[in-house]
Image (spheres, rainbow, N blue to C red):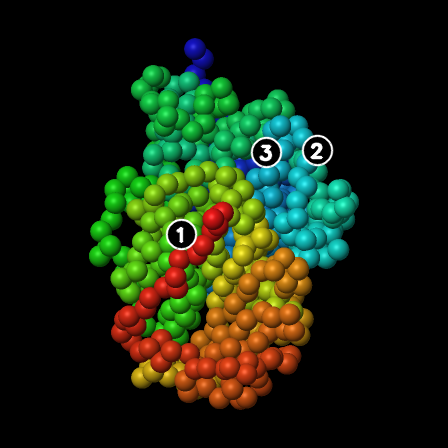
């Protein structure tokens, strides 16, 4: 049997001009950096390959742009990229190279919801007519708005249209066929069977491999180690050898960004609950606490990046860990979602499923609630979480946000009422020492990532949790239902909003216990009734 093992440079040499390259990666999780680095090095030396289209269903690698897609972010090397999200980071960090290309219009860039990108791979693999979906209707994904385009070059090459079928309006994404799939696993045997025992997620490598293989393309697998043929349990193999053409071994492959290996990330050991730190005291913790109060016992809840990511730590501190099952787009079900560079993974998970399967669950609204962030909110309750024109590289894009909110029954948005306010929290109340530098509740948001108009049509419940008040989406607009102790309704809420808010006739104070640095004695709402009712 001819060996499938090649060097990273040899793998990079297999890629031809104008190829479509699909890469399995998340934000620093599961990224085949060794192969991408070799591609970038080859282009610097040979000016080849040229004019590639890159597909990154969840994210384009390292969230700060240190690695990932920045390895290949060179003018002429890539001319089109479709990604669920892009590298981002604090303003103190240099702008990722891919963002400079996007802003200079050197690459046609699209921000496509992650679930839709996975659907595109599945439909291409099966040689179907492309993706027909209602995910993204009324948002920037809709061709009536941006059609996923991030810059002028992308707007010149539309990737989505609106079609009518069965008396309904759908978004249609035609298939984009990958010539090359670059995926990652932990171990390959000599034949190319892949196992993922050290990975924090399976992501979508199998679907990407199928999409390439079924159209005569090649599949390159980067792994940490090589094993003898016949040494793997069949049930452990996630991508079989018949789908793998080449193997690149990188013994220094990191588990996630800046994390060489932690067995808890891959579910190989279960951590004691005492190993998880509680969220430090702050106004942000107040928001996470109040968001937690929206949850029901025994519910299944999706969790997004930002303030919401701390809600599991709130439940842990309140003795409620395990009363909610968390589901994350990278595939973890249950356990304790992790933070920082390990976000997207969970310790002590009940299961880790493939991301495309998780997105099918999300798109169909099978879960009970989702907890997400917001950058801006408009009078309709629409939310922008994907674009800030002043500093676009500080936002990563939508990721799975649009897929998740499309049919979610209950959406809990969390964020500060204004950006950059100086706050003092304690003794059962909140004080605004200095108002924020910019408003977040605005007449017009820069991009619609969640449509309040469509949300009302679909009878979705949307709640907006801030440090100073709680708002609900109603048929007539946004209604203030709770206000923090110490906050003046007119001066700190109504005057800090660019549009008129409805004030509930039953306006009440937020629980003073939210504003004290000690456990609240929190209890969750009664269990959600789901399924058939007898």
Residue shown at the point (29%, 65%) measured from the top left: 318
Residue shown at the point (51%, 57%) measured from the top left: 88
Q: Above or below — where is 325 with respect to 42? A: below
Picture quadrant where residue 283 is located = bottom left
What is the spatial separation of the Cα atoms under label 1 and label 3, in whole angstroms?
Answer: 26 Å
Please tell me how crowded label 2 is: few (under 14), some (14-19), or many (20+) other residues with Cα within 10 Å. few
Residue shown at the point (31%, 54%) measured from the top left: 322
- Residue 386, given in percent of the width and then of the height, sits at 58, 59
Q: Residue furthest front?
A: 534
Residue beneath disc 2: 129
Q: Above or below — where is 460 with respect to 482? A: above
Q: Quadrant of the N terminus?
A: top left
Residue beneath disc 3: 122
What is the spatial separation of the Cα atoms under label 3 and label 2, in whole angstroms?
Answer: 11 Å
Q: Secondary structure at mark 2?
A: loop
Please tell me how crowded label 1 is: few (under 14), some (14-19), or many (20+) other residues with Cα within 10 Å. many
Q: Secondary structure at mark 1?
A: strand
Residue shown at the point (49%, 88%) measured from the top left: 488
- Residue 266, given in percent of the width and then of the height, sits at 33, 41
Residue beneath disc 1: 326
Q: Above or below — where is 451 with respect to 222? A: below
Residue depth check, mark 1 versus mark 3: number of the one nearer the observer: 1
Q: Secondary structure at mark 3?
A: helix
- Residue 95, given in percent of the width and then of the height, sits at 53, 58
């Amino acid at each position: 049997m001819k060996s499938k093992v090649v060097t990273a440079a040899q793998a990079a040499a297999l890629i031809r001009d104008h190829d479509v390259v699909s890469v399995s990666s998340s934000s620093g999780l599961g990224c085949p950096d060794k192969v991408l680095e070799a591609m970038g090095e080859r282009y610097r030396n040979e000016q080849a390959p040229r004019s590639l289209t890159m597909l990154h269903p969840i994210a384009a690698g390292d969230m700060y742009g240190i690695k990932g897609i920045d390895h290949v972010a060179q003018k002429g090397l890539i001319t089109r990229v479709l990604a669920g999200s892009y590298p981002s980071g604090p303003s103190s960090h240099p702008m990722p190279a891919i963002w400079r290309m996007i802003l200079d219009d050197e690459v046609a860039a699209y921000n496509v919801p992650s679930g839709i990108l996975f659907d595109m791979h599945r439909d291409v693999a099966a040689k179907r007519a492309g993706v027909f979906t209602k995910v993204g209707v009324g948002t920037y994904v809709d061709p009536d708005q941006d059609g996923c385009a991030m810059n002028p070059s992308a707007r010149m090459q539309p990737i989505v249209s609106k079609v009518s079928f069965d008396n309904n309006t759908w978004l249609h994404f035609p298939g984009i066929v990958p010539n090359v799939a670059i995926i990652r696993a932990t171990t390959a045997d000599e034949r190319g069977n892949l196992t993922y025992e050290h990975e924090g997620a399976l992501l979508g490598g199998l679907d990407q491999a199928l999409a390439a293989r079924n159209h005569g393309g090649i599949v390159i697998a980067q792994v940490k180690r090589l094993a003898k043929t016949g040494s793997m349990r069949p049930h452990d193999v996630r991508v079989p050898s018949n789908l793998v053409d080449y193997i690149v071994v990188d013994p220094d492959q990191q588990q996630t960004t800046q994390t060489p290996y932690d067995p808890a990330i891959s579910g190989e050991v279960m951590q004691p609950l005492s190993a998880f730190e509680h969220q430090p005291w702050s106004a942000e913790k107040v928001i996470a606490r109040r968001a937690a109060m929206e949850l029901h016992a025994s519910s299944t809840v999706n969790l997004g990046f930002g303030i919401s990511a701390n809600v599991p730590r709130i439940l842990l501190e309140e003795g409620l860990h395990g009363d909610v099952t968390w589901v994350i787009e990278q595939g973890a079900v249950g356990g304790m979602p992790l933070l920082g560079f390990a976000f997207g993974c969970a310790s002590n998970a009940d299961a880790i499923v493939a991301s495309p399967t998780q997105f099918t669950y999300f798109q169909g609204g099978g879960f009970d609630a989702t907890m997400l962030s917001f950058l801006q909110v408009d009078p309709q309750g629409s939310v922008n979480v994907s674009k800030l024109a002043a500093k676009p590289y500080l936002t990563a894009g939508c990721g799975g946000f649009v897929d998740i909110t499309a049919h979610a029954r209950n959406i809990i948005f969390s964020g500060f009422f204004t950006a950059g306010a100086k706050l003092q929290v304690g003794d059962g109340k909140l004080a605004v020492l200095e108002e924020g530098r910019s408003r977040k509740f605005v007449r017009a948001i820069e991009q619609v990532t969640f449509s309040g108009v469509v949300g009302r049509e679909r009878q979705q419940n949307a709640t907006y949790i801030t440090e100073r008040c709680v708002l609900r989406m109603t048929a007539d607009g946004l209604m203030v239902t709770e206000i923090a102790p110490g906050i003046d309704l007119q001066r700190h809420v109504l005057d800090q909003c660019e549009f008129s808010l409805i004030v509930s006739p039953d306006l009440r104070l937020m629980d003073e216990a939210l504003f004290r640095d000690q456990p609240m004695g929190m209890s969750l709402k009664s269990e959600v009734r789901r399924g058939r009712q007898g």
